[in-house]
Image (tube, rainbow, N blue to C red):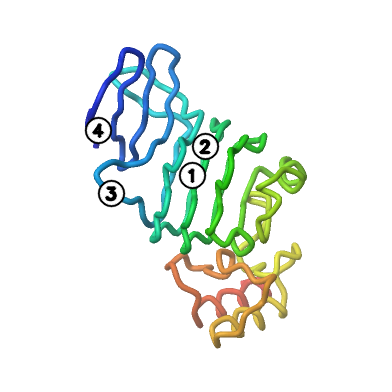
Amino acid sequence: MLQSLAASAFAVEVEIDGLLYDVDTNIKEAKVVEHKNGVKYKGDIVIPDAVDYEGVTCSVTSIGPQAFYSCSRLSSVVIGAGVQRIGIQTFYRCPELTRVTCYAENPPSTQGNVFTSSDIGNIRLYVPPASVDAYKSTAPWSNFKKIRGIGTIAKGDVNCNQAVEVTDVVAIVSYILGEQDNDFDEIFADLNGDGKVDVEDVVETVNIILGE
């Protein structure tokens, strides 16, 4: 869905696939901005590498100030590879945010309080494998609970030690029983991709260990 909302001399404010952007076709760039009229983003959000507007492909290079401010039902965000800048309080007070995937090779620059009140210490961050050290040494990205390389962990390796083994089975069972482990990553425990971790995933993990 694409709906034009407002325009200026250099940019147009447009909604594309549920996200609001400031799009400047002159420089072929777009910025994600806060939705209007009290609408709050929720669920799983994907910010693409680029958007098309009136036949022009514009790279998404930034996320504007307070774009996701107080989005209390926002659960995960994928940030495209072209994003270079993130504005002040962009993800402020997003209590249900548990996962951020950022494809930018260089950690995007940020202004103040980007993740304040969003429990950043318990949010998992996934980045390009070659960029893990850069994110670990750059604030506020370095404050994330876990920073892992995209695609480097196999399904079933829930403790992320580069092997699927009996300890992973034990960890999944413990998770199902309500026990918490800081090293446990439920993304890699959902082996059948049904959005939940249950006995079926335990069976799938055992089958991997047995080579089936």
Foreground: disc 2 or disc 4: 2
Question: Which of disc 4 and disc 2 is earlier in sequence?
Answer: 4
Does the CB distance between marks 1 and 4 fall below 8 Å?
Answer: no
Indicate the position of residue 52 as horizontal and vertical percent values: 35, 25
Does the CB distance between marks 4 and 3 fall below 8 Å?
Answer: no
**Which residue, given by chain and number where applicable, does mark 2 sit on?**
87
Residue lying farthest to the front in this orientation:
112
Q: CA distance from mark 2 to mark 1?
A: 6 Å
What numbered label is drawn on residue 90? 1
* Foreground of the two, 162 or 211: 162
**Which residue, given by chain and number where applicable, does mark 4 sit on?**
2
What secondary structure is found at the residue carrying circle 4? strand
At horizontal 30% and vertical 43% (from top left) the residue drawn is 18
Tag 1: Cα neighbours inside 10 Å, few (<14), some, or many (≥20)?
many
Q: CA distance from mark 1 to mark 3?
A: 15 Å
Indicate the position of residue 95 as horizontal and vertical percent values: 48, 63
* Foreground of the two, 187 or 179: 179
Tag 4: Cα neighbours inside 10 Å, few (<14), some, or many (≥20)?
few
What numbered label is drawn on residue 39? 3
Question: Which of disc 3 and disc 1 is earlier in sequence?
Answer: 3
Give the quadrant of the C terminus: bottom right
What secondary structure is found at the residue carrying circle 2? loop
Question: Which of disc 4 and disc 1 is earlier in sequence?
Answer: 4
At horizontal 70% and vertical 45% (from top left) the residue drawn is 139
Q: Which quadrant of the figure has residue 119?
A: bottom right
State whether residue 84 is above or below residue 149: above
State whether residue 7 is above or below residue 191: above
Q: Amino acid at mark 1?
A: Thr
Question: Which of disc 3 and disc 4 is earlier in sequence?
Answer: 4
Q: Amino acid at mark 4?
A: Leu
Q: CA distance from mark 4 to mark 3?
A: 17 Å
At horizontal 61% and vertical 67% (from top left) the residue drawn is 185
